[in-house]
């Protein structure tokens, strides 16, 4: 059946559709095939309508997981991720995950029911089950927009509108609030209309001319590519720009995978490595593509403002809020670069740049080997299987930091890392969505502390038979926070945790599991074997790592600035 729901067909034949049918019809017209959710007394009508329409609803064990899974799905596909949760505390449970989607630009629609409109009295808190004083207001700081439906007949249009806003660059989450009585309210067929396309932005010709002038006057340009460039699908264009300029390309965490690993201009690591940071220092022009030059990427803006900065961003205010740009070209990175590359000449210097980048790669690997030999083993094992895995989801743990900064990312949307907001416990539940994205087996790299945030989702993996490999690095607690305390010379408090037998825990859910010590060949072999599997499994690694130089306690510019 097409995007029209079965319920809508019945309505057209004289049956009676409901608000929930309109909601589901709109989701399908937005291209949604899978929804993540938790049932509650207020949203059961959505589950019924979804079942009638053939829309898959994956039930999870916590509302936060529903949004993390929708986020993982959205990052892996670029399509709309949808979470359906219930009223009050159920909606509130999603806020941490929704904030991460906002900070990382993931197009997510959070559909939350609210108390019946018939029981709501404006300005009065009455104590209705799950009532809040203003549920939508809770979401305002962590979403692009909030939409509250006022009638069942508006549900189709409101859902299409909310989903379209989430998908419109700059992408991000949107809240849709639905009074529960509207879901069951009878209504006629929705007034269907094509989902509005993303509006095309005309690039200013004068800005393009000025951009070419800036580029022509630069002798040592550097391309800085962020998540906006990746989300725009601009990889080939960014690669061509770099070739024409014979310029190195540094990608942020959100931009990793934008260029293939073998691209001759791709810098093999983050700017937190001094040898790579020098590329920024020595550049006379930085071309920033789809990045806001955030604190995490720039060591809290300790990187000096370049002599000239050319920014390309759909949001000019976002582009220049941290480093004032000499010129900002407003528009989607793909659209702008497509126009900018016209008549842009090819420069000499590619062979010399290739030699520089090869030397940088040797320096980075030597740094890893000296800094943390176990991290070298982890990275080697991940790199060997990178083409076989779908999405690598790295959590806010020490192993995750190493992987997100230094592992091989074979293509766009193949790495998900929550360094937008920095939410602990992201990777494991987000892997639920990534595993359903159709790109292959999801690989979640988590710490023992963060894994326990959502360990109940082992039940979801088993029930849905999802292709997820979960690597739990067990160092007995919050290793990164332990390092912070030791580094600061204070006693360790709250970081050394009593943890379960993770193998026994996984097996109690019917999920195969095993343990290895360290990141040697036994780990590499077990990881490769896991990727040949079909359903979920767990690999526990007993190891303690030193954090990489990309983590804030080790930022080298902070040390340089110290008196």
Image (cartoon, rainbow, N blue to C red):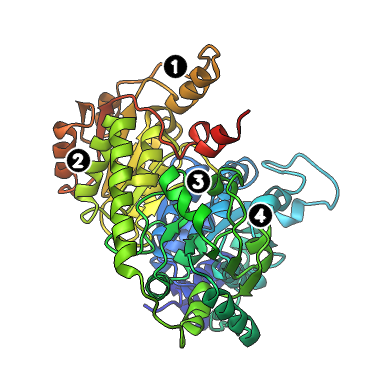
Mark 1–mark 2 Cα distance, whole angstroms, equals 27 Å
- Residues at marks 3 and 4 touching, judged by CB atoms closer than 8 Å: no
Which quarter of the figure is the N terminus placed in? bottom left
Q: Residues within 10 Å of mark 3 (few under 14, many from 20)?
A: many
- Element marked by disc 4: loop
First of labels 2, 3 by sequence position: 3
Nearer the observer: mark 4 or 2; the answer is 4
Can residue 518 be spotted in the picture? yes
Q: Where is residue 162 in the image (x, y as percent from the top left)?
A: 61, 67
Identified at 45% across, 42% down, the residue is 426
Q: Mark 4 points at which residue?
A: 322
Q: Distance between the residues labelled 4 and 2?
A: 41 Å
> Circle 2: is it few (<14), some (14-19), or many (20+) Cα within 10 Å?
many
Residue at the image point whose x is 50% and y is 50% from the top: 67
N-term mark: 4 or 2: 4
Circle 1 — which element? loop
Reading the chain from its start, which is encountered first: label 3 or label 4? 4
Residue 414: x and y, percent? 34, 56
Crowd tier of the residue under label 1, counting other residues whose Cα lies within 10 Å: few below 14, some 14–19, many 20 or above: some
Secondary structure of residue under mark 3: loop
Q: Mark 3 points at which residue?
A: 419
Residue ID for mark 2: 527
Spatial separation of the CA atoms under disc 3 and disc 4: 17 Å
Label 2 secondary element: helix
Judging by the rendered image, the residue that carries numbered circle 1 is: 496
Question: Which residue is pictured at 50% across the width and 67% down the height?
Answer: 24
Mark 2 and mark 3: span between their CA atoms? 25 Å
Earlier residue among tags 1 and 3:
3
Furthest residue in direction right, as rendered? 123
Q: Position of residue 553 (x, y in %)?
A: 52, 31
């Amino acid at each position: 059946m097409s995007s029209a729901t079965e319920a809508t067909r019945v309505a057209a034949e004289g049956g009676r559709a409901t608000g929930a049918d309109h909601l589901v019809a709109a989701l399908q017209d937005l291209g949604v095939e899978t929804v993540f959710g938790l049932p509650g007394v207020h949203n059961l009508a959505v589950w019924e309508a979804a079942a009638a329409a053939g829309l898959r609803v994956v039930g999870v064990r916590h509302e936060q997981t529903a949004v993390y899974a929708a986020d993982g799905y959205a990052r892996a596909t670029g399509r709309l991720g949808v979470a359906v949760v219930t009223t009050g505390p159920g909606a509130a449970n999603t806020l941490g995950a929704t904030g991460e989607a906002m900070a990382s630009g993931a197009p997510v629609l959070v559909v939350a029911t609210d108390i019946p409109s018939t029981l709501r009295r404006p300005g009065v808190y009455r104590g209705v089950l799950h009532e809040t004083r203003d549920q939508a207001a809770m979401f305002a700081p962590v979403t692009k927009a909030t939409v509250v439906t006022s009638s069942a007949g508006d549900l189709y249009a409101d859902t299409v509108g909310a989903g379209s806003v989430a998908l419109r660059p700059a992408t991000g989450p949107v809240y849709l609030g639905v009074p529960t009585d509207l879901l069951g309210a009878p209504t006629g067929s929705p007034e269907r209309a094509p989902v509005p396309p993303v509006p095309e932005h005309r690039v200013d010709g004068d800005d393009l001319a000025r951009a070419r002038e800036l580029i022509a006057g630069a002798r040592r340009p550097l391309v800085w590519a962020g998540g906006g460039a990746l989300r725009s699908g601009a990889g080939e264009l960014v690669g061509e720009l770099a070739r024409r300029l014979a310029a190195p390309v540094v990608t942020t965490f959100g931009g990793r995978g934008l260029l293939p690993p073998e691209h001759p201009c791709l810098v093999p690591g983050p700017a937190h490595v001094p040898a790579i940071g020098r590329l920024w220092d020595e550049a006379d022009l930085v071309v920033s593509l789809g990045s806001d030059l955030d604190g995490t990427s720039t060591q809290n803006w300790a990187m000096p403002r370049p002599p000239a900065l050319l920014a390309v961003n759909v949001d000019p205010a976002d582009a220049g809020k941290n480093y004032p740009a000499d010129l900002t070209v407003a528009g989607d990175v793909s659209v702008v670069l497509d126009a900018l590359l016209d008549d842009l000449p090819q420069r000499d210097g590619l062979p010399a740049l290739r030699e520089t980048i090869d030397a940088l790669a040797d320096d980075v690997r030597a740094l890893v080997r000296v800094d943390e030999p176990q991290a070298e083993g982890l990275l080697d094992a991940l790199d060997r299987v990178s083409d076989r895995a779908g999405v690598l989801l790295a959590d806010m743990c020490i192993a995750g930091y190493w992987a997100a900064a230094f592992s091989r990312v074979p293509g766009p949307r193949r790495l998900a890392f929550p360094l937008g907001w920095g939410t602990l416990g992201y990777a494991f539940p987000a892997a639920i969505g990534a595993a359903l994205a159709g790109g292959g087996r999801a690989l979640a790299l988590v710490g023992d502390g963060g894994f326990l945030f959502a360990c109940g989702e082992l039940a979801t993996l088993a029930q849905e038979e999802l292709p997820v490999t979960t690597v739990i690095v067990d160092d007995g607690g919050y290793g990164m926070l332990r390092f912070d305390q030791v580094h600061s010379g204070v006693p360790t408090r709250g970081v050394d945790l009593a943890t379960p037998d993770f193998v026994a825990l996984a097996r109690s859910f019917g999920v195969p599991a095993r343990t290895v010590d360290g990141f040697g060949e036994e780990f590499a072999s077990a990881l490769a074997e896991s990727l040949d599997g079909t359903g979920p499994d767990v690999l526990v690694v007993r190891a303690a790592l030193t954090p990489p130089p990309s983590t804030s306690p080790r930022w080298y510019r902070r040390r340089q600035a110290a008196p």
